[in-house]
Amino acid sequence: MSNKTKRFILPEDEIPRYWYNIQAEMKNKPMPPLHPGTKQPLKAEDLFPIFAEELSRQELDQENAWIEIPEEVREMYKYYRSTPLVRAYGLEKALGTPAHIYFKNESVSPIGSHKLNSALAQAYYCKQEGITNITTETGAGQWGAALSYAAKIFGLEAAVYQVKISYEQKPYRRSIMQTFGAQVTPSPSMSTRAGKDILTANPLYQGSLGTAISEAIELAQTTPNCKYTLGSVLSHVALHQTIIGLEAEKQMEMAGEYPDIVVACFGGGSNFAGITFPFMRHTILEGKKTRYIAAEPASCPKLTRGKFQYDFGDEAGYTPLLPMYTLGHNFAPANIHAGGLRYHGAGVIVSQLLKDGYMEAVDIKQLESFDAGMLFARAEGIIPAPESTHAIAAAINEANKCKETGEEKVILFNLSGHGLLDMTSYDKYLAGDLVNYSLTDEDVQGNLDKIGDLV
Ligand SMILES: *Cc1c(COP(=O)(O)O)cnc(C)c1O
């Protein structure tokens, strides 16, 4: 085993003081979100009824490249940040690759994933603005868990709609949310108009993120002093997550290297944005030739097979229309174990960057993702979240290419979370019960045809 440094961490006073807002430096800015009724471009004020005001401003900010992290949020970050940057010597050896593989370990946050980085910021701004209650939706439960904890820290009441199938299949994440004092409701529920409509049409519906978002937004709109929060997709969430890449940039410097390839798994794009944007800054401003790879599940391929168009963020059509790569807001993905990657669309910033050729996307089949997760677990001793295994699989593919060519490329990937609460998925894999889901072009096109052009 090499006697070189394996783990790079920053002293407290080196934790970044600003988030990086890539919108301000993009050559082609993302197109504006549109009001779902009037189809007019939205201003920050239009978002105030749903989101905290500061978050609404951050969402549409195309001017300020650096946004100061509030002292209270930075103090909370210090409990788990910086997260370690680790040289994956074990994985390199297992692969026999000349590539240098590094991963940023976001699984060390108190709730086990990167989600807390934005949850703390969102809860803080809500509290600052005198809000008492926050709502949200959660799929696999990572976001709900992060938000429930952040709400507790800043003294807010949290109500979480959890996609019904996850509520039933992942009971421990529900217990975690309840441990932090949140009220958790399986979605679709009879507590909202949106939920009732869907249940009336289809009483056995197992739920989707889109439906749960509709329910959470409706609750926020009908409850006084209550705001809605979202754990992915939106630009202010991507902004908060840049703490990951800003730290990684300093840590790679400590390691004396610079990444040729940066990889992350992709649900709505927040952990991908988080690790890549600070590096992509150098590609935009200085033409640095780094590759950025988003790894999505083959069963929910919005980046590799979706269409760039205006679409709703939720199933019921309550949200603004967003210019994004989408499979259609009514897309019902297969029930893969990477619950956090089952979303129909991609954030507007990443969508624009993909359209402009700044990044690439690959799709990974379920069995390939778990093969990679097993290999990583055995080599590095960390059981990755099923979502994160997609990033690992894509990083392994690149490392294997280096093996063929003999190139010593530097590959950095984000380990977005651990999988210690996802052992049922690993059990199924070990028992040979996991399957791949295929999606025909007709499935993809048929769904897009159904929604048509919305603008
Ligand atoms: C939510 C989640 C994801 C996917 O969300 P992004 O916004 O695309 O990052 C990935 N990994 C983990 C562990 C998650 O909790």
Image (cartoon, helix red, strand yellow):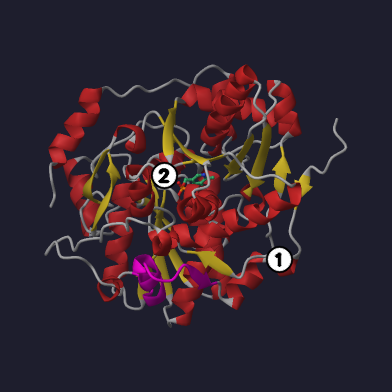
Q: In percent of the image, x 24 and y 24: which residue is there?
A: 441
Question: Is any atom of residue 425 visible in this view?
Answer: no
- Neighbour class for label 1 at 10 Å: few (<14), some, many (≥20)? few
Choose between 100 and 386: the one closer to the eye: 100
Amino acid, disc 1: Glu
Choose between 55 and 411: the one closer to the eye: 411
Amino acid, disc 2: Tyr
Q: In percent of the image, x 67 and y 56: which residue is there?
A: 250
* Picture coordinates of residue 403, whole percent (x, y): 64, 20
Choose between 213 and 165: the one closer to the eye: 213
Q: In percent of the image, x 45 and y 25: which residue is there?
A: 365
The region drawn magenta spans 51-68
Q: Which mark is residue 71?
A: none
Q: Which mark is residue 14?
A: 1
Does the magenta segment cover residue 323? Answer: no
* Picture coordinates of residue 36, whole percent (x, y): 17, 60
